[in-house]
Amino acid sequence: MSHIHIALVGNETYPVYSVIQFLNPDKVYLICSDGPNGSIKEAETVSEKVSLPKQQVTIFPVAPADFDIIYRRIDELRILFDTNDYLTINITGGTKFWALALYKAFASRPDTQFYLFNQNNTLWNLETNKSVPLAGLGLDTIISLYGNDSTTFRNFNDYTVDDEKSLAQIE
């Protein structure tokens, strides 16, 4: 029996990564969209950062908004799993259509747990209505999850008058 984790990836990588690290699954599927405003880059970031071998993490693109297409794609995912697999599904990210399609496809499996991660670093099990606080991530990890390097920075003396003008325009 394998522990399979499915996570919806939108623009926020922190909740996806945090839940994967806490649940420590054997294999992860990252649901994302690859359209022009898609979340494939965020899924790739999570894939690189989690403490699993790369072959244990699958990026699984789906359509962003057409429910029929989304559900057919999620159904392709559903049939991959053995009935003995234990499934956890994090519906925190992504679109509502993705969450609904996952619920429709997997809710009837008795070995499936749905989770929601909130802004207070609390992981809610939607099957048991119980929560657990998760330890916060280190600042370096958080910065890297958003695609930045915490060791690279710009000295304040490097900013120019043009930078100040741009800032004034933005404000």
Image (cartoon, helix red, strand yellow):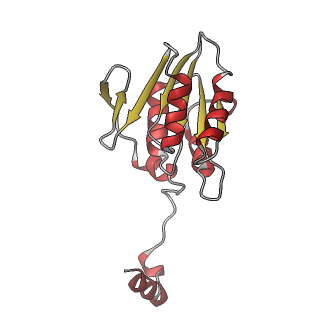
Tell which residue pokes out farthest to the front in this image.
Answer: 68
Q: Residue at x 50, y 51 (%)?
A: 11
Which one is in front, 54 or 86? 86
Instruction: Work out which quarter of the rendered image holds the N terminus and state it.
Output: top right
Residue 93 lies, in percent from the top left, at 47, 43
Q: Is residue 113 left or right of residue 68?
A: left
Which one is in front, 165 or 160? 165
Q: Residue at x 49, y 46 (%)?
A: 13
Tally the marks: 0
Q: Is residue 100 left or right of residue 70?
A: left
Residue 137: image quadrant is top left
Q: Is residue 121 left or right of residue 90?
A: left
Q: Is residue 26 above or below residue 39?
A: above
Residue 165: image quadrant is bottom left
Residue 58 lies, in percent from the top left, at 66, 34
Instruction: Work out which quarter of the rendered image holds the C terminus and state it.
Output: bottom left
Residue 111 lies, in percent from the top left, at 50, 14
Which one is in front, 94 or 122? 94
Q: Residue at x 46, y 53 (%)?
A: 143
Q: Residue at x 42, y 85 (%)?
A: 169
Q: Is residue 144 above or below residue 7?
A: below
Residue 26: image quadrant is top right
